[in-house]
Image (cartoon, rainbow, N blue to C red):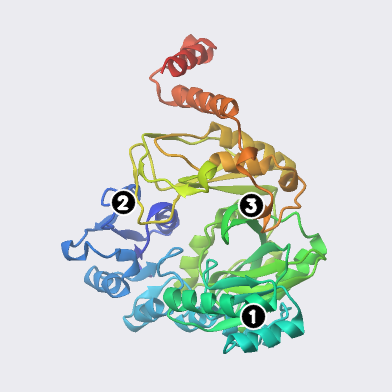
Amino acid sequence: MSKKILIANRGEIAIRIIRSAKKLGLTTYVIQGNREPDAMYLEYADEIIPIRENLSEKIIFLNPEEIIRLALEYKIDMIHPGYGFLSENPDFAALCEQNGITFIGPSSDLIRNMGIKTIAKKMAAQAEMPLVPGSAGAITDAQVAKEFADNIGYPVILKASAGGGGRGMRIVEKPETMERHFKSAYDEAVAAFGNGDIFIEKYLTNPKHLEFQILGDKHGHVIHLGERECSLQRKHQKLIEEAPSASIDAKTREQMGKLAVKFAQSIGYYSAGTIEFILDEDGSYYFMEMNTRIQVEHPVTEIITGVDLIEWQIRIAMGEKLKLKQKDIKFKGWAIECRVNTEDPQNRFTPQTGFIERISFPHGDHIRIETGVKDFSVVTPYFDSMIAKIIVHGDNRADCIEKTMKALKEFSISGLKTTVPFCRTVLRSKEFVEATYTTHWVDSVFTTNMLESEDEAMMAALAATITYAKEYLQYSSDSPMFKSESLNVWVLNKRINK
């Protein structure tokens, strides 16, 4: 059995992976990042691989050769890439394979094939997955794209074959703008991915984004763990996720789940992964792509199924058979995840950097917090702005929304602005409550006027301060002052005076 595991990542996902790895008795290693040498995740690992001075100009998590060199030096058996960085880099996975290190994820060939959208679509077509009308392969130039769009009808969307995260993607409303958008998409794709291949699809104007979580082992067994609703997005980046989705019924869920499993089996997939679907207004759904890594939003699935996805990622990588059968997967209640980003929603979500003076999270048996920061942590401009995830479980969707709202009001931070006020705005919106929101909600519905007033924000901050004071001030839990309203009055006076 492998004993040493290197987490080639940082922040909350590094801590999350360490938690599961230690359950399996593995010795956990992390790399001290050169841009945040005192980061919180370093405290959780068994061993820290120290920074090297001559690498100060390059982020270590984007340096596959150096990670492999360190892994060999420390006699590492396995590497978990987390999400982002090198998690879907087929060359990194291949380097692991070539050096006898177990890559916790699918094979480099599977990562490469699913990363090239035209290849993935071709494989999906062979598996009889429903596809959005579009080109079977890359389009060579703007004129060919225009002819194709004339056949399937406008609007259309141009997508980078090697793309992701919205890069190399352009919506074309009319023939006159095709040439300009095609050049823009091509240039961005080359700059971002080193691959200018562009394909074209019919653009669905008001879609939802659903993803099915799958697990497959190296012995041909694949199951799904239901879907996640990921339609609340800004610039193709998810902000709030929930599981299950209120957008489909049980029959549709079963059909889509079977398709996801069928596709994964057809390509010989193993490890955790997601089959991404786009859902049209008429209820039609289409295969969009496959992600070959653990997702940021995986906790909502874990909460409603009770399955530790990262533990199974590791077990599968070590060659274990998946003991879970499809009939074993039961869904309990509802879960919502709110991403806490250091961005200012009042100012076009401008990123915030600097010191976190104080941060306090909500607590409760129904609440799960994933974070990589604490009091006095530094948020740098070098990494993604997400500093935490607040995940809440409820008996049903209405109960979960109510509990999530309460949890968000109990969150408090000083020093930086976050997207928590935005999350509160979303959860109380008519579209979210009625589950009619789509991927365009932020762009087409949200305005800063919908955010809380200063009075509402102050009351929420005061409530969070009271919670913080009760947790951290040195009052005995048996003290009459702790149990009485006098502490609340004391805290309010202190806050108001300040």
Q: Nearer the viewer, residue 266 or 353?
A: 353
Q: Quadrant of residue 255?
A: bottom right
Q: Nearer the viewer, mark 3 or mark 2?
A: 3
Q: Earlier in the sequence, mark 2 or mark 1?
A: 2
Q: Position of residue 184 (x, y in %)?
A: 52, 75
Distance of label 2 from label 1 (alpha carbons): 44 Å
- Identify the element where label 3 is drawn: helix
At label 3, the amino acid type is Val
Judge whether 86 appears above or below 336 on screen: below
Q: Nearer the viewer, mark 2 or mark 1?
A: 1
At label 1, the amino acid type is Ile
Q: Nearer the viewer, residue 172 or 305?
A: 172
Is 414 left or right of 448, judged from the image as shown? left
Marks 2 and 3: in contact by CB < 8 Å? no
Would you call the spot at circle 3 few (<14 residues within 10 Å), some (14-19), or many (20 or more)?
some
Distance of label 3 from label 1 (alpha carbons): 24 Å
At 56% from the left and 82% from the top, the residue drawn is 198
- Identify the element where label 2 is drawn: helix
Q: Which residue is mark 2?
A: 42
Res 442 label:
3
Is 472 left or right of 110, judged from the image as shown? left
Name the residue furthest left: 53
Q: Quadrant of residue 108?
A: bottom left
Q: Earlier in the sequence, mark 3 or mark 2?
A: 2
Res 200 label:
1
Q: Earlier in the sequence, mark 3 or mark 1?
A: 1
At label 2, the amino acid type is Leu
